Image: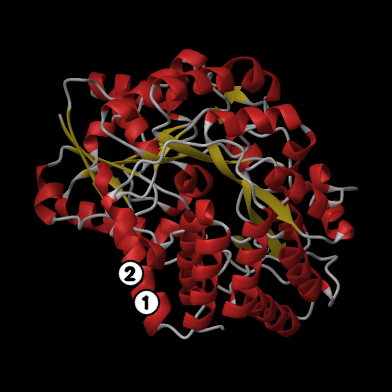
Amino acid sequence: MKTLLIYPEYPETFWGLKHALRFISKKATHPPLGLLTVAAMLPKEWEKKLIDMNIESLRGKELELADLVFVSGISIQKASVKEIISRCKKLGTKIVAGGPLFTTAYEEFEDVDHLVLNEAEITLPAFLEDLKSGCAGHIYTSDEFPSLEKTPVPLWELINMKAYATMSMQYSRGCPFNCEFCNIAALYGRKVRTKSKAQIVAELDCLHSQGWIGDVFLVDDNFIGNKGKLKREILPAMIEWMEQKKHPFAFNTEASINLSDDEELMQLMVKAGFASVFVGIETPNEESLTECNKVQNKNRDLVACVKRIQGSALYVTGGFIVGFDNDPPSIFERLSAFIQESGIVAAMVGLLNAPRGTNLYQRLENEGRLLQDVSGDNTDFSINFLPKMDYGTLMRGYGRTLKSIYSPEPYYKRVREFLREYNPLQKKAFHFQFSHLKAFFKSMLFLGIIERERVYYWKLFFWSLFRRPKLFHLALTFSIYGYHFRKTFQEYL
């Protein structure tokens, strides 16, 4: 059986880091971890090829030679997904589709031959068994949330690692919280399911044996959903592995704000090699936090929480949202001030949207306020429901917020304030890569000479070089990020 696994193309987005990737000559930020894991679940005797359309073009010959095409994706990839399906149908190539996009909106994809929905550990074996018997059905679905202890190591040999900025791993699925706008609870449940210590070590070994050195992103929606197991088993095992291998990786992940309550956990993460953590802060407005059921963020000094995490040597990237029913007209200025005060350099501010499967979608549907499906990009100035705030006021305020945090002067000021306070607790082995040298010279050319921000760039360049030399690489990294953010929102700024 010749199988072709296709990962659809992403449009230009905030998190795609397209403009930043050019500095290090990489084509994509993350590899298609889900498809690589599915590939490892397919029969070993099958011939497998993976095409990531963010890395290379999909040629007609490859589709013609395939007996089965496997496609997975999320909502922002919908346009590319439909193009893939259309090309397959013209050639008569059978399509197997799964992943979040298809699980939440399978009725939109009538031309897909086999829909293998929900989590592949349960639904894929049933499909493969029927396929072997010659009676494969149209839809395979399940209400169960499987154990992850039999999830295989991804089939990394199917990709060219050099094309990516970072590799990915998954330790857990599910989140104990139930925020109104988030579909993670619907997709993966509120009970956190985890891999074993042996699985994590095996995945680290596999990445290392493939020659990877650099960043590794733990894609868990809430890495600290099961704090006890992390502290007892997983992080100690990661610490031991990293010490034995001389620290080849730098880890990044996502976590809820209550990470700031656990000093022991933060110290273990830093010792294991974690460098940053994405935190969904959403809003400084308490009424809006109540509205969206963000209980873990309520009744807190959120700036102090961020400072505690960053004081532990984990720098915070933050997610923020405007457009809640309870947002006052002053929310835009309050949010801008919060971001500057907290020192969150990479702050993603998006418009509230209601994805399918969320409590927010259900509420707005009941209220007759839904307008359309989500675009999948919460920073493209689209909103899929009627907001309580005047639409024009909301869009103008959102634009002001973007300008106030990404314009060169406030952005570089925020970087400098962060670097002034940031103190990494541990010396890590530095693995020089040619891409670092490329980024260094390209930053001087584009940011220091061509772009209008050059005055701010050189001020930060020399300040960090002489005042915080150990963080000089981070100063350049944030400068490049800022360039990407401004390019992404260029037409609005």
**Which residue in the protein does label 2 denote?**
442
Q: What residue type is labelled 2?
A: Lys
Instruction: Please identify the quarter of the rendering in which residue 410 is found.
Output: bottom right
Q: Which residue is drawn at 65% across and 62% down?
A: 353
The percent position of residue 312, horizontal first and vertical second, equals 69, 40
Image quarter of the C terminus: bottom right
**Residue that label 1 marks:** 446
Q: In this view, does 95 lie to the left or right of 60?
A: right
Badge 1: how crowded within 10 Å, few (<14), some, or many (20+)? some
Say left or right for 163 vs 108: left
Vertical side of 487 occupied by 53: above or below? above
Q: In which quarter of the image is residue 223?
A: top right
Residue 99 position, x and y percent, is: 44, 41
Q: Which residue is drawn at 19% across and 45% down?
A: 93
How dense is the environment of label 2, judged by Cα within 10 Å: few (below 14), some, or many (20 and up)?
Answer: some
x and y percent of residue 50 in the render? Answer: 23, 41
Relative to 176, 408 lies left or right: left
Q: Do the residues labelled 2 and 1 touch (CB within 8 Å)?
A: yes
| Residue 455 seen in render | yes
Which scheme is used to colour this image of the protein? Answer: secondary structure
At 33% from the left and 50% from the top, the residue drawn is 111
